[in-house]
Image (spheres, grey):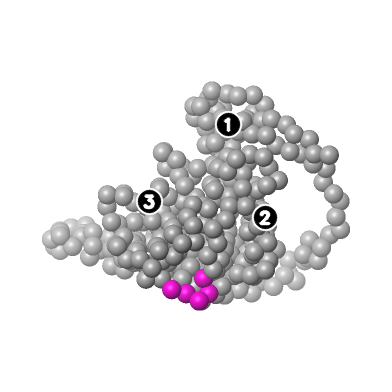
Amino acid sequence: MAKTKVKFVCTSCGCESLRWLGKCPECESWNTFQEEIVETAKHKISSPTKNSLPKKIDEISSFEEERIKTKIEEFDRVLGGGLISGSVVLIAGDPGIGKSTLVLQAAAKINKTVLYVSGEESAQQIKLRASRLKISSESLLILAETDLHTIQHIIKNESPKVVIIDSIQTMVNANFENSAGTVTQIRECTATLLESAKRDNFSVIIVGHVTKDGTIAGPKILEHIVDTVIQFEGDVKNSYRILRAIKNRFGSTNEIGIFEMHDTGLLEVTNPSKVFLGDRETLISGNVV
């Protein structure tokens, strides 16, 4: 029988304590500890699968599977050339910055089956947004759902190559009594998606919100779970957006992507020098981007 225990978790860094603390001893944030109820169950002993058996390193194939292109060059460059099957990508940014627009545009351009899961909008609302962005795709599936077990069942039936979760703060794993958006739910939902992606060989793009100080909402451990962490930055009063990788297991973190927000969605800025230095005199020393 499962047992329950109460612990307190810092929403900023994931530090755990058996009692509530006003100041986190790890990240020194104030009033960030939340009560979490955790169920502990006895683990069943299972037989090892074929994939869990050790292999000699020289016998492992080093062939790199072809990346899944989003057909958005600025996005693909930041990813390192496209999505890797079995990987999990986290895209974080302020509310209203354009995260949902970016992933919806990418989902429509990928020439493979894509499952777009939204916990914040209904299917009808997504369709209206897609119509405004002039998005149409035969391979794009829309699902308005927050229950992770239901989502996993649909993934098993539809076998998509890319799954988009918008956003991770709205997802709920029924195995845990905590409400959506808590540290436990965010961590466990992400870990479950990662396990499924590795096992069934599909890519996952997770949309995550950031806090007032610009850090990803949820524990820092979330950044360690995923393979790639991408920040989507900009000012809602300004039309330009910058996409940068702060962690990438399959590519460089030195690349950035620049976009401009329009009524019809995000447009790639292929010549940033012309945009940011267009009003300057060309003969000024140091005039380069």
Task: Name the amino acid type tagged 3.
Answer: Gly
Residue 59 part of the magenta-drawn span: no
Image coordinates for residue 254, horizontal then vertical, percent: 43, 58
Q: Which residues are magenta?
A: 136-140
- Answer above or below: position of 165 versus 73: above
- Of marks 2 and 3, the one in the foreground: 2
- Residue 90 can be seen, yes or no: no
Q: Nearer the viewer, residue 95 or 19?
A: 95
- For disc 3, the marked residue is 96
**SS category of the residue bearing label 3:** loop
User: What residue do we see at 47% from left, 47% from top?
Assistant: 209
Give the spatial CA distance, label 2 vs label 1.
25 Å
Give the spatial CA distance, label 3 vs label 1.
26 Å
- Residue 185 can be seen, yes or no: yes
Few, some or many residues within 10 Å of mark 3 (<14, 14–19, 20+): few
Does label 3 or label 1 sit earlier along the sequence?
1
User: What residue do we see at 36% from left, 56% from top?
Assistant: 242
**SS category of the residue bearing label 1:** strand
User: What residue do we see at 41% from left, 66% from top?
Assistant: 130
Q: Nearer the viewer, residue 230 or 133?
A: 133
- Answer above or below: position of 190 versus 63: above
- For disc 2, the marked residue is 149
- For disc 1, the marked residue is 34
Residue 139 part of the magenta-drawn span: yes
Quarter containing the N terminus: top right
Image coordinates for residue 120, horizontal then vertical, percent: 49, 52
User: What residue do we see at 65% from left, 48% from top?
Assistant: 173
Task: Name the amino acid type tagged 2.
Answer: His
Image coordinates for residue 62, horizontal then vertical, percent: 66, 72
Mark 2–mark 3 contact, CB under 8 Å? Answer: no
